[in-house]
Image: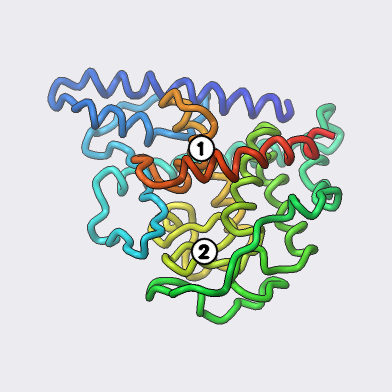
Amino acid sequence: MGTGYYKTLLEGARESLEGVFESLSNDKTKKPTTSDEADFRLQNKRTYSDVKQVQMDRSRLPGLVSPRIRSGVETNEDSMSLLDRAYEQTHNQNKILMSEMEARQGSRTTDDPEGTVSNTNADIASSFPENLLGSTGSIEGEVVSQSYFNTPLSGNFESFSRAAGDTTKEEKQKVINLIIGTGRQAGMSEREIAYTLATASVESGFNPEAAAHESSASGIGQFVNLTGKSYNINKDTRWKLEAQVQALVDHTVDNIAMAKQKGLGEEYIYALHHDGPKLNRDGLSISREKVMPLVGKYLKYLTK
């Protein structure tokens, strides 16, 4: 069993979500509204085909993480909606499932005929041209109180500031290679990995120390505090590369599943990352203008 096996598990699980929701819809004690149904389908994101469907308490319906907020006004964590709290529970269950899959993968020997283990640590980034090493940001601009922009650099990376892209070429290549390896271990297709790279390029320019002026968004994936909490980003892990990359990969996998469940095109994957489930900000326009043009370019190098 190799990469194909785990991809099959992912794809099968994504399709199984409709069955879970249908079982909930049959609960006559509390019929969900149309809005509840739409939100629930969005929230039940990454599961796997070998997981038994469980009848769920409607009071614990999975919700979505709050969207990244660029306006400088963030959701109060004390006022998290029921859906937000329940989503965190579902996401934790997904993490357990992923750990089990990784344990199975790690138990296989390196003579796997599909070469799954050996190709996850390849140095692909060294072949990337300069224009694929991330966007650059500005150090100018008003900084809001919740921003990490003016906090001292962690010293964990070869970064010069908290502006997007303001780090060394070597640091960017390290980030890129880790995203590729982590994505492959998660069972992502090469195109999905390319999409993850494009997201990181636009969000942070592959600078692990990057922070936004106008919100608490930080790191490779620019997670605000509330969203990051659901992906193990906290005061202890905020400036750790492995945690940042794992969070971005997990969130992208979740958004890919959400877009598919809603019947949306792949340009909405980044829009969901940027806006959240309401898609009420400028994420779609950024996706079409900046993210989508990069996907094919990254894919070209991933499939060489």
In this image, 168 relative to 138: left or right? Answer: right
Density class for disc 1 (Cα within 10 Å; few <14, some 14-19, many ≥20) is: many
Q: Residue at x 71, y 45 (%)?
A: 180
Total labels: the figure holds: 2
Judging from the image, what secondary structure is the residue with disc 1 in?
helix
* 235 over 300 or under it: above or below: below
Q: Where is residue 110 in the image (x, y as percent from the top left)?
A: 84, 38
Q: For the N terminus, which image quadrant?
A: top right
Which residue does the numbered mark 1 point to in the structure image? Answer: 269
In this image, 275 relative to 203: left or right? Answer: left
Q: Residue at x 78, y 35 (%)?
A: 300
In this image, 125 relative to 221: left or right? Answer: right
* 292 over 113 or under it: above or below: below
Q: Where is residue 268 in the image (x, y as percent from the top left)?
A: 48, 35
Q: For the C terminus, which image quadrant?
A: top right
Quadrant position of residue 165: bottom right
- The one nearer the camera, 57 or 151, is 151
Q: Are marks 1 and 2 in contact (CB under 8 Å)?
A: no
Q: Residue at x 48, y 57 (%)?
A: 223
Q: Which amino acid does label 2 sit on?
A: Ser
Residue 103 in view here: no
Alpha carbon distance from label 1 to label 2 = 19 Å
Quadrant position of residue 105: top right
Quadrant position of residue 114: top right
Q: Residue at x 53, y 34 (%)?
A: 267
Q: What residue type is labelled 1?
A: Ile
Mark earlier in primary sequence (1, 2)? 2
Which residue does the numbered mark 2 point to in the structure image? Answer: 218
* 18 over 48 or under it: above or below: above
The residue lying furthest to the bottom in this view is 152
* 51 over 146 or under it: above or below: above
